Amino acid sequence: MPKPLIAVLMLLALAACAAPQTAQILKVSGDLPRHAEVASVPFFPQEALYCGPAALAMTLSWSGLEATPETIGPQVYTPGREGTLAPDVVAAARRNGRLAVEIRDLDTLLAEIAAGHPVLVFQNLGLDWWPQWHFAVAVGYDLERRVLILHSGTTERLETPLDAFEQTWRRSGYWALLTLPPERLPARAGFDRVLVAAAGLEQAGRADAALTAYEAVLRRWPDEPLAWLGKGNSLYAMERDKEAETALREVVRLEPESTAGWNNLAYVLSRLGRRDDAIDAALMAVALGGGEAAYIETLEEVASN
Amino acid sequence: MKRFIILLLAVTLGLQSMLLVPAHAAMVSTGDAIAADTSVATDRDRLNALMQRQEVRQEMRRHGIDPDEAAARVAALSDAEVTEVAAKLDELPAGQSAIGIIVGAAVLIFLVLLITDLLCLTSIFNFTRCAAK
């Protein structure tokens, strides 16, 4: 989208009501630095409707991968819709082995920039009933001058008034995304959101990246059973069964009633050739699982080996 | 709400045999464990995890809805809408485990109706808004 058009649409955005999150941050910035910019975030000018691939290529490149809009395009662009869906961006980031963590408020967005992480943002540059969807990358901000700096469209470092940005961001449902190398955790995100991102790596078939992510998670949050479950599942997927057993035993040590922990331990032990131990674990899952059929089938499966 | 329950029961009872996914033994994926743990995952995470489940995606296709489109619509719900949807999900009869190893029939129907509401094809819930309004 050409720069003058973006500017006009930003002005239209200002015609609406105030931007509450901006107002709050300008009043009380807390421990946010007054200004910050992430150095050397690659810029790819978008072509036509390719703002999704361009934006994702930028953040993936920054995270250490070789990525261009041409290579990313087929992974996210939906020709029938002439655009990119946000969930496709998340899925592509995960398939590329990146920790894709959603950001849903302005304060967190700015905090991540201050921590040196560029943020992929989803905007509606139009109106609620006439949307103009757009993906861009937030690379910096300045609270004194009240601007956000974006790689957007064909403009590198487009300076956007913070309140205008917030309004375009509000209309997209406040959707933004970090795409981090898996050993690096977000500065601000809570355990649950990071855990979901790590599990997403498993789901996308990147057990190697998932393992790295879970290990980073466990360094920050050592006693979380779900993080140990993720680590165990990832190791099992990578056929490192002995280590998987150790991780899954941590799950049930921390949470003795974890049916998932016992169930999965049964599979690991079975593959290690320890039939009796596998049956014991499967029995625990059955007993704790209230008769759920799936656990009984696990028991039957490990007992039949 | 009463109308919804009657509709839900009618549809659920009528299609029960077709909707229930047969149980099969497998590793419990981390994603599913997260979705089932309400203390950890936020409502939004649970909802997004649900929309990615195979049974849900299949159910969407069965009703002629593109599962990616459906997931995108749910991902775009505002925080307030997510809270409402999550609350309704928790109200549903447990049946064969509302969210767990198997996605229960009641949950599947609820999600389909939620999506058709968001697509302006139906107007069942009072907390959904669709673009045409």
Image (cartoon, coloured by chain):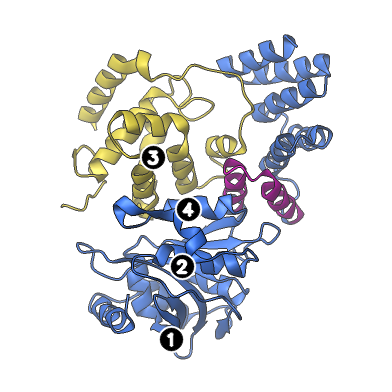
Chain colours: A blue, B yellow
- For the N terminus of chain B, which image quadrant? top left
Alpha-carbon distance for marks 4 and 1?
Answer: 35 Å
Disc 1 on helix, strand or loop? loop
Foreground residue among B13 and A200: A200
Q: Which mark is residue B87?
A: 3
Alpha-carbon distance for marks 4 and 3?
Answer: 35 Å
At 61% from the left and 47% from the top, the residue drawn is A201
Q: Is most of the magenta stretch helix, strand or loop?
A: helix
Labels 4 and 3 touching (C-beta < 8 A): no
Q: Residues within 10 Å of mark 4 (few under 14, many from 20)?
A: some
Q: Is B2 drawn above or below residue A287 in the view shown?
A: below
Disc 4 on helix, strand or loop? helix
Tag 1: amino acid: Arg
Sequence-wise, the earlier of marks 4 and 1 is: 4
Q: Which mark is residue A146?
A: 1
Residues rendered magenta in the picture: A194-219
Which residue is label 4 attached to? A75
Q: Estimate the x, y position of residue A295 in percent, counting from the top left.
A: 62, 18
Q: Chain ID for label 3?
A: B
At 34% from the left and 78% from the top, the residue drawn is A164
At 46% from the left and 77% from the top, the residue drawn is A151
Disc 2 on helix, strand or loop? helix
Labels 1 and 3 touching (C-beta < 8 A): no
Foreground residue among A223 and A81: A81
Q: Residues within 10 Å of mark 2 (few under 14, many from 20)?
A: many
Tag 4: amino acid: Gln
* Of marks 2 and 3, the one in the foreground: 2
